[in-house]
Amino acid sequence: MPLRTQGSRRPLFCIHPVQGLSWSFSKLLNHLHKDQPVYGLQARGLNGKGQLPGSIHEMAKDYIDQIRRIQSHGPYLLLGWSFGGFVANSMAVQLKDLGERVDLLAIMDTPAKYLHLEEDEADTTEADCREQPSGSGDKESSKDEIALLENIQSYLDLANQSLSTVHIDARDLTLERRRVIMEQGNRINENNLRLFKQYSPIVYVGDILFFNATVNGVKGSEIVPTVDPQ
C-alpha cells in the first residue's frame, strides 16, 4: 500500500500488526522527512481471495518479493509493528541470507523475548531452521497472545482516522467494503495468532531499533533487556 511514493530517499517498508492492515502507518508521514517514501505491507486475503500464509517465514518471503518490485536491491529499511515485528525480523534474516543489506530494522511493541535466542544458537539462520509449535500450556505465550490480540474494530477506527492523511475519502469505503474488511480481518487475525503460537524466532545478526510503548503498558526497561545485545 503506497503511503508516500515521492522522494529520493530509500523507501521505508512498514509491516502490519496482527489484523493485517497498514493504514495507520500514514500517521508516520508527518514525522518523517518529506523526501522519504513510505509503503505499508498489508496481509493477503483482505479481499476475501487467496490462501493465507502457513508460517511467519512464508509471509516474510512473500513480502520480500513484494518490496523487491519497488526496490530491487538493498540497503533496505524495515519497520514492524507488534506482530509485524516478527515478520520484519524474519524478512531481515532472509534478506541477509540472499546477500542483501538491511540498514534499518525497527520494531515497535513486539514481545522482545521472542526475538531472542541463546548465544549457542546465534549462528542459526532462517534458511536452516523451521518454525516449531510451542507448548499449549505455555502461560507466558498466552499472555503475549493476549497482548497481540488487538481489537479489530478499534484498529479500524484508528485506520479510518488515518484515511485523510493519505487522501482517501472515507465515503469511498462502502458498508459492504467495511463488512468484507471486518470479516476478512477476523480471519486474518485468527490465522496470524496461530502463526504467532507456532513461531520459533531466528536471531538477526545486526542492529535492531526497538520502540516500546510505556503508556498503559510494560515499561521499556523491563522488556528491552530481553533482546540479545549482540
Image: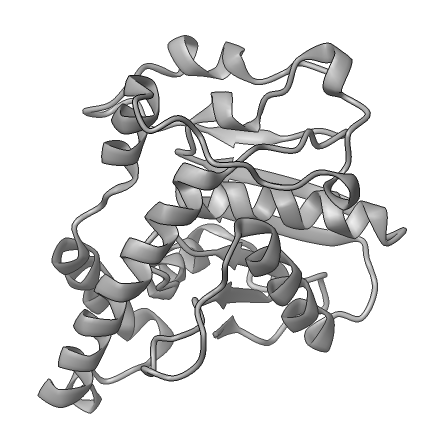
Q: Where 80 sits versus 212, above or below?
A: below
Residue in the image at 73% along x and 70% along y? 68
Q: Residue at x 18, y 70 (%)?
A: 182
Residue extending furthest right? 99
Q: Nearer the viewer, residue 172 or 134?
A: 134
Relative side of 227 to 154, left or right: right
Q: Quadrant of residue 229?
A: top right
Between 226 and 184, the one nearer to me in the picture: 184
Where is residue 34? Give x, y as percent.
55, 63
Note whether 92 is above or below 34 in the view shown. above
Does residue 109 appear in the picture of this structure? yes
Identify which residue, 12 or 89, lies in the foreground.
89
Q: Please give the name of the residue rendered at 42% of the width and 41% of the height, measured from the top-left corner.
A: 196
**Residue 194 % position (x, y):** 36, 47
Specify the quadrant that holds the C terminus. top right
Residue 101 seen by the camera: no
Q: Residue at x 22, y 46 (%)?
A: 150
Relative to residue 37, is residue 60 depicted above or below? above
What is the x, y in percent for residue 26? 39, 62
138 relative to 174 in the view: left or right: right
Q: Coloured how?
A: one colour
